[in-house]
Image (spheres, rainbow, N blue to C red):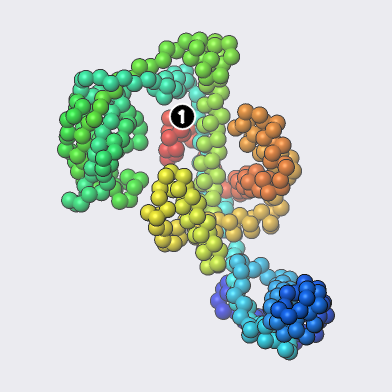
Amino acid sequence: MAEAVEKINDIERRVKVIVPIAPYQGEISQKFQQLTKTARVQGFRPGKVPLKIVEQQYGGDVKSEVYTKAIESKFGEFVQKNNLRVAGMPDIQHEPLEKVNKDFEFTATFEIFPEFKLSDFKKIKVTKYETSITESDVKKTIEVIQKQRASYSKVDRPAKMGDKVMAKMQSFIDGEVAESTGKESLDFILGDVGRVKGFDDQLVGLKADETKEFTIKYPKDYSTKELSNKDVKYIVSLQEVLSASLPKIDEDFAKSLGVADGNLKNMKEEIKSSLLEESGRRIEANLKQQVFKAFVDNHKFELPKSLIGAEINRLAQTTYQNMQKQGVDPKDIKLEPSMFEENAKTACKLRIILGNIVDNNSLQASTDQIKEKVKEFATNYDDKDQAIKWFYEDEKRLDEPRALATEDNVVAWFLKQCKSETKKIELDLVLAGQFS
């Protein structure tokens, strides 16, 4: 009897399948015969256990093993015959397999990948950013490197921009403690980017062992939602003020950056080259981000819950591992699935759309494209040849280069379909990720 597929909703299906037991009796008998040689039963020597005793003692386990494989095989045949793209693992229900003595039925409830029509990409516009590297950009980069290599010494004077300070602090929102360093101290450099505007200004002029209380109004568009548009009160106690001593820009400085001959002109050229390479990567990443966002924003379809669940688990596990690496006690880690649900939905939706585009347009990465991507990866290692060899020693290691090369193909394909504009952007904005 042909299996009738029941449509529960757009992506959920149910089917009932009959499994005849006759084709599996030979395999069951063979397993019993093998067990007579290895089974250990009290009162019998190894290898001398009667077949009937083996069947009585191990019959249920053997039946469960054989019929479980039979169910998997039958479900696989059903999926293939009906050309179904199953998403996630099916929920299979059946009677206890150890008690099966005649043909039996199982019910499989499962999800399939959604069917959808790709949007008209001709209506979508993306921005291709361009930047240039000036002498000023190179100079700024050298100054940043200088600051990164600065040495600091304790001073007995008020703090000023560029100083490193050691401080204890507490923050309050609506009268409740939001954060506190407790007995520990934080160290940071006054004037560094990344902190809310005005915070460092409040500490300028403060000396060690002095405490200041002040309030900062966070902007509405602040990246941390909990702080956006909030008045946050701070109590900061400076422990130490340290003055920076910058290294000289000389031959030794150039050599420390990998310029073998210590030539400052060559150093500047290498820095310029690095800035071009890095800005190119970031602009390319931004373009890919625009394309992928366009895919997600311009398609609507139901997502398989099984895929979302698996992605939530993956994101939670990655977050958990990262927090452990940062020294967080596992007992203090409580990750709720809801924390990852939106990101999981976006990732699943994008993956489904990408798969559709890749399969329907034959955009899978070629061997040469994968090889080029591996070479790019290898530039991050001291021994490039050894790194390339490492990638090719295990096929699974090529998964990431293959996926990224395929994504590049999708972006190139999309750019032929959509509208685009070119826009100049300053290097500082590129490196800060502030694409407008």
- Which residue shows up at 32% across the image and 28% down it? 189
- Work out which quarter of the rendered image holds the C terminus and state it: top left
Q: How many labels does the image show?
A: 1
**Residue matched to label 1:** 427
- Which residue shows up at 21% across the image and 47% down it? 172
Q: Is residue 365 visible?
A: no
Residue 427 % position (x, y)? 46, 29
> Residue 94 appears in which quarter of the rendering?
bottom right
> Residue 215 appears in which quarter of the rendering?
top left
- Estimate how packed mark 1 is, as few (under 14), some (14 to 19) or many (20 or more) residues with alpha carbons within 10 Å: some
Residue 166 % position (x, y)? 28, 30
Q: Which residue lies furthest to the bottom in this view?
A: 102
- Work out which quarter of the rendered image holds the N terminus and state it: bottom right
- Which residue shows up at 45% across the image and 48% down it? 324
- In this view, 144 is above or below 307: above
Q: Is residue 173 left or right of residue 338?
A: left
Amino acid at dot 1: Leu
Q: In this view, does 60 lie to the left or right of 29?
A: left
Question: Residue 49 or 212: which is nearer the viewer?
Answer: 49
Residue 195 % position (x, y)? 32, 36
Question: Residue 393 or 197: which is nearer the viewer?
Answer: 393
Q: In this view, does 68 lie to the left or right of 32?
A: left
- Which residue shows up at 44% across the image and 62% down it? 337
Disc 1 element? helix
Q: Can residue 356 be seen in this view?
A: yes
Q: In this view, does 55 lie to the left or right of 238?
A: right
- In this view, 76 is above or below 226: below
Question: Residue 188 or 406: which is nearer the viewer?
Answer: 188
- In this view, 310 is above or below 280: below
Residue 398 % position (x, y)? 68, 45
- In this view, 17 is above or below 10: below
